[in-house]
Amino acid sequence: MPSLTTVLGLVKHATFLQVVWYGEAVTGTPRTELGQPDTVDDSFALGPSDTIASVLADYDRAGAVAREVEAAYAADHVVSGHRLGPMTLRWIQLQVLRELAQHNGHADILREQLLAAREPRPAGGAPGSRLLMITGPIAAGKSTLAAEVCRLLRASGRSVALTDLDTVAEMALPTLPSWDQAHAIHAQLVGAWCATDIDVVVDEGTSTPEEVRQVRDRLPAGIPIFHVVLIADYDASLTRALGDPGRGLSKDPDFLRADHDAYARHLPDLPGSWRLEVEGRMPADLAAEVLQRFGA
């Protein structure tokens, strides 16, 4: 059976989830009476009458209803129309944000696969380099995960280059002129390695959409990208930071909290292929799952 996960199917599902959370949950009207299927799986299915224009129009209408609900009720208002029982509007807002961020990642995977499929292979049939980018807040375990991913790739016989922002910055410490310069040089370095015939470039250090864009702008045209966006808990990250003797300012709770709060604000706009929850799992297990998704 072919997969129901298509770009247009994801948009149709995004309409479904907003109708369910802002329609059914708030009014108590069953989702089927609101023009939606009864099950999540069916919400991805495209029918003969579905077009790009019609699916986008339905999505816009669902978004307008969601905005009307949010304008009409306080965040602590309790609704009870959903099958899960009573919940606050704030809980619904966070749930919808989480689901939309997740499916944005799914859409980005599909987009990158489509673009990669259209690019001709380099002369001689060589596959060329691939970029595995790891983005996350401070003390989320980016460096540990990247190092373990590289170890597994090299053990499988792949050639790997590991690039990271902190190493670039350390080249100029303690006289680093600005972090903006470190980010610019880091992006150039990633692009330079991706222009070689090395199998995989693993990069870590980005944490904002602008930093990701800066790296992508330096990449050779058509290079396949798999972008892992880490989801980390502040308290667990603080424990990791305090236990790392090599850390300085990031051990400060207020500094780390500010970084994690900023990352949470940026998260919906990060163009990742996949969101990865890191807490409660060993780095080796996380790395193995990353490589399985990466296709290595």
Image (cartoon, rainbow, N blue to C red):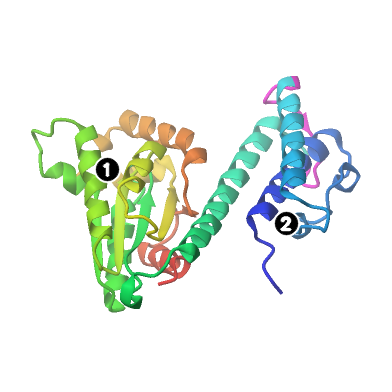
Above or below 132: residue 251: above
Say which quarter of the image contains residue 78.
Answer: top right
**Rendered residue at 35%/59% (across/down):** 131
Disc 2 to disc 1, how far (Cα)? 44 Å
User: Looking at the image, is 206 positioned above or below residue 202?
Assistant: above
- Under mark 1, the amino acid is Leu
Considering the image in quadrants, where does the N terminus appear?
A: bottom right
Q: Would residue 136 be found to the left or right of residue 30 on screen?
A: left
Which residue does the image show at 78% across and 59% down from the upper left? 42
Tally the marks.
2
Quadrant of residue 170 within the rendered picture: top left
- Nearer the viewer's eye, disc 2 or disc 1? 2
Above or below, comparing residue 80 to residue 222 in the picture: above
Where residue 184 sits in the image (x, y, percent)? 24, 40
The quadrant of the picture occupied by the C terminus is bottom left
Q: Which mark is residue 257?
A: none
Residue 44: mark: 2
Q: Which amino acid type is shown beneath numbered disc 2?
A: Phe
Image x and y of residue 293, in percent: 47, 66
Magenta segment range?
72-85
Question: Is residue 68 rendered magenta in the image?
Answer: no
Label 2 crowd (10 A; few <14 / some 14-19 / many >=20): many
Q: Main secondary structure of the magenta part?
A: loop
Question: Any mark on residue 242, and which?
Answer: 1
